[in-house]
Image (spheres, rainbow, N blue to C red):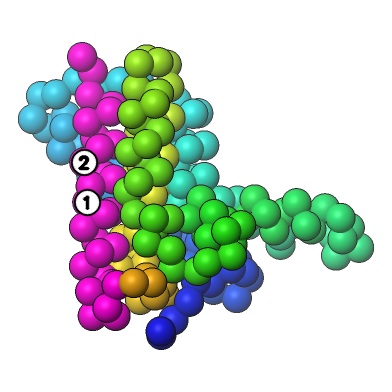
Amino acid sequence: MGASTITTARESPRPSCAFGLAGAVALLGIVLMRRRGIAVERLGAGFVAALIVGSSGLFFLPGLLPQSWSHVHAVGAAVSTGFADTTASALGISGNPLVFSALAPLALTALLYGVRKLRPTLAGFGFGIAGTLLFAAVSGTVDIRYVPNFLDPIWLAAHAGVAALLASAVIRKA
């Protein structure tokens, strides 16, 4: 039981790195699809918002809020981490294998794929989760429960790949 999740944005570069990796994974997926001649759905603000929610949250927000506004800091702390960290904190279980997997993008895609206008948002969320999982695999900041420690990076990288492939499939124009 080594490392645990990092929950504060000020103490670590984790949120900005996860967001950067999510953006790089999304860009790579889109470029590879276009290079193969595959048309891609139009991406907009929903894609970017879901990418941020899936990867890092609004990690810069706590630094912008005045220290005297303690009630606003509680809200700022809640939205300053990404989906995986927020969900793990809400459940009270760090390193939950269901949270740190491609299950959330898969479930949302299965439920909402029929709504054509939400496809870019679903893709952004999938790429965001892929970036978070990839960062956790590379940096070793998450210890996945019920998985041996030497398999943690493999678990995280495999699920990052699944989330990225799913996101790429979602933004493919039919």
Residue drawn at point x = 30 percent, y = 20 percent: 41
Q: Are marks 2 and 1 in contact (CB under 8 Å)?
A: yes
Closer to us: 4 or 132: 4
Q: Regarding mark 1 in the picture, which secondary structure is present there?
A: helix
Closer to us: 154 or 148: 148
Instruction: Tell me residue 95's x, y (percent).
Output: 44, 68
Above or below, comparing residue 138 to residue 44 in the picture: below
Is-magenta flag for residue 160? yes
Quadrant in the picture for residue 156: bottom left
Residue found at the far front of this picture: 146
Left or right of 149 in this view: 104: right
Give the dominant element type of the magenta stretch: helix, strand or loop: helix
Residue found at the far bottom of this picture: 2
Left or right of 80 in this view: 48: left
Residue annotated with mark 1: 161
Quadrant in the picture for residue 96: bottom left
The boundaries of the magenta stretch are 147-174
Residue annotated with mark 2: 165
Query: Can residue 20 be spotted in the picture?
Result: no
Left or right of 15 in this view: 119: left
Instruction: Give amino acid for label 1.
Output: Gly
Residue drawn at point x = 50 percent, y = 28 percent: 45
Instruction: Tell me residue 118's x, y (percent).
Output: 43, 22
Closer to us: 112 or 148: 148
Closer to us: 27 or 71: 71
